[in-house]
Image (cartoon, rainbow, N blue to C red):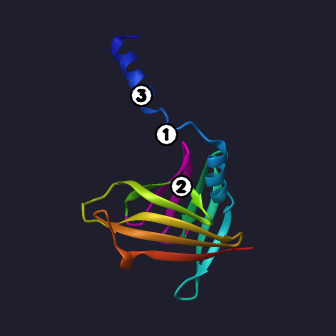
């Protein structure tokens, strides 16, 4: 192998290393990830027209991620992928607006798991709106509130935010 190939291989290996600098804390990781894994199933909320707004959670990839599909089969369908990253729970929101905010939650406080924005991929222009916060509020085993907060240029836009009150479908 020539020196260039060795240098590229070393660079790629370093780039693929974990982004977290803290040693993994299994209890902390389980507290975060197990809360989201427990959401597996179909959830709904009555829409403004009375038709149900459906959200589906599915554990995937050998238990290493949770996929959330909001409004499956509609033009507004969106996907959220939850995964562990060190001692944090990472969330990528594949938004119907066409951008992909990356968020992190580092602890669960009471019945809430709050995600804050780390970065936003694929903003078409600097004044494009994006989802910058999500708080999951675990009311009980059959009720979940999602509080999504919109941002523009790093500033909260409270009139553009949305809340969902979901009930597990039995």
Residues under labels 3 and 2: Cα distance?
24 Å
**Residue in view at x 45 percent, y 55 percent:** 103
Q: x, y (%) of residue 155?
A: 31, 67
Secondary-structure class at tag 3: helix
Res. 109 mark: none
Q: Is residue 153 left or right of residue 25?
A: left
Q: In which quadrant of the rendered image does the C terminus lie? A: bottom right
Q: Do the residues labelled 2 and 1 touch (CB within 8 Å)?
A: no
Secondary-structure class at tag 2: strand
**Residue in view at x 54 percent, y 71 percent:** 146
Q: x, y (%) of residue 69?
A: 56, 64
Residues under labels 3 and 1: Cα distance?
17 Å
| Residue closer to the observer: 148 or 60 | 148
* Span highlighted in magenta in the image: 72-97
On screen, 35 above or below 157?
Answer: above
Secondary-structure class at tag 1: loop
Decide which of tag 3 and tag 1 comes sooner along the chain: 3
Residue count near mark 2 (Cα–Cα under 10 Å), binned few <14, some 14–19, many ≥20: some
Locate residue 37: give its quadrant. Answer: bottom right
Would you say residue 75 sits in the magenta stretch?
yes
- The residue under label 2 is 81
- The residue under label 3 is 12
Residue count near mark 1 (Cα–Cα under 10 Å), binned few <14, some 14–19, many ≥20: few
Q: In which quadrant of the rendered image does the N terminus lie? A: top left
| Residue closer to the observer: 89 or 73 | 89
Would you say residue 80 sits in the magenta stretch?
yes
**Residue in view at x 38 percent, y 76 percent:** 158
């Amino acid at each position: 192998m020539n020196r260039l190939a060795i240098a590229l291989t070393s660079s790629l290996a370093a780039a693929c290393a974990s982004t977290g600098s803290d040693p993994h804390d299994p209890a902390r990781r389980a507290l975060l990830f197990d809360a989201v894994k427990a959401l597996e199933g179909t959830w709904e909320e009555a829409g403004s027209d009375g038709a149900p707004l459906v959200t589906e959670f599915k554990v995937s990839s050998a238990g290493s991620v949770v996929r959330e599909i909001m409004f499956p089969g509609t033009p507004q369908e969106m996907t959220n992928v939850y995964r562990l990253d060190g001692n944090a729970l990472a969330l990528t929101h594949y938004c119907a607006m066409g951008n992909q905010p990356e968020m992190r939650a580092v602890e669960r406080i009471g019945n809430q798991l709050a995600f804050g924005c780390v970065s936003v991929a694929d903003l078409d222009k600097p004044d494009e709106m994006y989802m910058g916060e999500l708080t999951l509020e675990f009311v009980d085993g059959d009720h979940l509130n999602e509080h999504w907060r919109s941002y523009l240029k790093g500033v909260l836009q409270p009139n553009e935010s949305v809340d969902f009150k979901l009930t597990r479908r039995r």
